[in-house]
Image (spheres, helix red, strand yellow):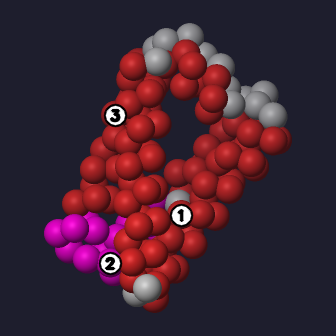
Amino acid sequence: MLTGFAYGLAVVLDVFIMFIGARFLLQPEQAAAAYGVPSPPSAYLTVKGIRDVSYGVIGLCLLFFVGTTAEAWFMLAVALVPLGDTVNVLRNGGTRAVAFGIHFATAAIVLISAALLFAA
């Protein structure tokens, strides 16, 4: 049962980050506002979108073609991204609610996912 939950959470997180990346590619202004630091469309938002879609694809490939241990290490490493996003939002005028309620909470969930994958 733990393995199924670990796989499921990892898949949800990987697909979710792909969705966020696609939103940055298709609706950059709205995605930036939801990120916590509103910004007009720019190349940087496109880069963020490509990065996020890529992280999701890499995560799914690791999970399905390599296994839970590889995905766990990936999740552990990629948790640095939402932690960095937390700092970025705080340093650029975003609210503490968005920084901690979205980005820091995401980092915590990603770390939980890594722990579950290591245990599976």
Quadrant holding the C terminus: bottom left
Residue lying at the far right in this picture: please name it.
96
> Left or right: where does residue 35 sit relative to residue 28?
right
Q: Nearer the viewer, mark 2 or mark 3?
A: 2
User: For the image shown, how many numbered marks are present on the structure?
Assistant: 3
Q: Which residue is mark 1?
A: 110
Q: Which mark is residue 50?
A: 3
Tell me the magenta residue range.
62-78
> What amino acid is at disc 3?
Ile
| 7 relative to 102 in the view: left or right | left
Q: Nearer the viewer, residue 111 or 15?
A: 15
Q: Are marks 2 and 1 in contact (CB under 8 Å)?
A: no
| 92 in the magenta segment | no
Amino acid type, callout 2 = Thr
Q: Is residue 58 above or below residue 7?
A: above
Q: Give the mark, 2 or 3, whose residue is nearer the N terminus.
A: 3
Amino acid found under the numbered disc labelled 1: Val
**Residue 89 in sight in this render:** yes
The N terminus appears in which quarter of the rendering? bottom left
Q: In the image, residue 52 lies at what x, y percent?
A: 40, 41
Q: Nearer the viewer, residue 57 or 6?
A: 6
CB of mark 3 within 8 Å of CB of mark 1?
A: no
Q: Which residue is mark 2?
A: 68
Spatial separation of the CA atoms under disc 2 and disc 3: 24 Å
Question: Which residue reaches farthest left?
Answer: 65
Residue 64 counted in the magenta span: yes
Which residue shows up at 45% across the image and 47% down it? 16
Q: Is residue 91 left or right of 40 when viewed as pictured? A: right
Classified by dominant secondary structure, the portion drawn in magenta counts as helix
Residue 27, above or below 64: above
Task: Identify the residue shown where x is 81% and y is 41%.
Answer: 97
What is the crowding at mark 2: few (fewer than 14 residues within 10 Å), some, or many (at least 20)? many
